[in-house]
Amino acid sequence: MFLRGSSYDGPLFFVFMNIESIMRAHHRLSDIYYRFDSLEFLPHPNPYISGTRAMKFFPNGYGVSVVCSNDVFSNGRDNYELVVVRGNSNTWMPMMKTAFSDGPIGYLSKARVSEYMIKVQKLPMIITN
């Protein structure tokens, strides 16, 4: 078989994937999550809180607010406070109760922030009418 515009004149091979291999590929793709390194820290917008804050929103309708400041549950240097939020970058509200927290989660290392970010991304999608 000859492909128009190509000098290749060998046979074309078609690979058919069975449902198991498709599910394995989907599972690998679903293991791609935002982590701490994806956060962009800016000066905290509240003038009464020193330090920095990063906000990240996920496709499921949830997000996280991550703060590094002496004014919250953080030492202001190398650990962080995380709050689960609901909404988007324009309109959001803190979630005081989730399956894994009852409000702000404090004094987290970067690795623990990543773990909680993955938990938030795995929450069921918010359906709005």
Image (tube, helix red, strand yellow):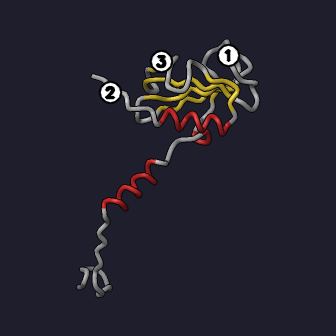
Task: Report the quarter where the N terminus lies.
Answer: bottom left
| Position of residue 37 measured from the top left corner of the image (x, y, whole percent) | 61, 42
In which quarter of the view is residue 69 placed? top right
Task: Report the quarter where the C terminus lies.
Answer: top left
Q: Which residue is mark 3?
A: 93
| Position of residue 94 measured from the top left corner of the image (x, y, whole percent) | 51, 18
Question: From mark 2 to mark 3, how far is it between C-alphas?
Answer: 16 Å
In which quarter of the view is residue 91 placed? top left
| Position of residue 109 measured from the top left corner of the image (x, y, whole percent) | 70, 34
Question: From mark 1 to mark 3, how far is it between C-alphas?
Answer: 18 Å
Q: Alpha-carbon neighbours of circle 1 within 10 Å: few (<14), some, or many (≥20)? A: some
User: Secondary structure under badge 2?
Assistant: loop
Residue farthest to the top, as pictured: 48
Question: From mark 2 to mark 1, how far is it between C-alphas?
Answer: 33 Å
Q: Mark 2: which amino acid?
A: Ile
Mark 1 vs 3, N-terminal side: 1
Q: Which residue is mark 1?
A: 49
Mark 2 vs 1, N-terminal side: 1
| Residue at position x 75%, y 32% in the image | 78
Query: Which dot, 2 or 1, sits closer to the camera?
Result: 2
| Residue at position x 62%, y 24% in the image | 105
Please state if 67 lies on the left or on the right of 9 as rendered: right
Q: Mark 3: which amino acid?
A: Met
Q: Which residue is mark 2?
A: 127
Q: Mark 1: which amino acid?
A: Ile
| Residue at position x 49%, y 48% in the image | 32
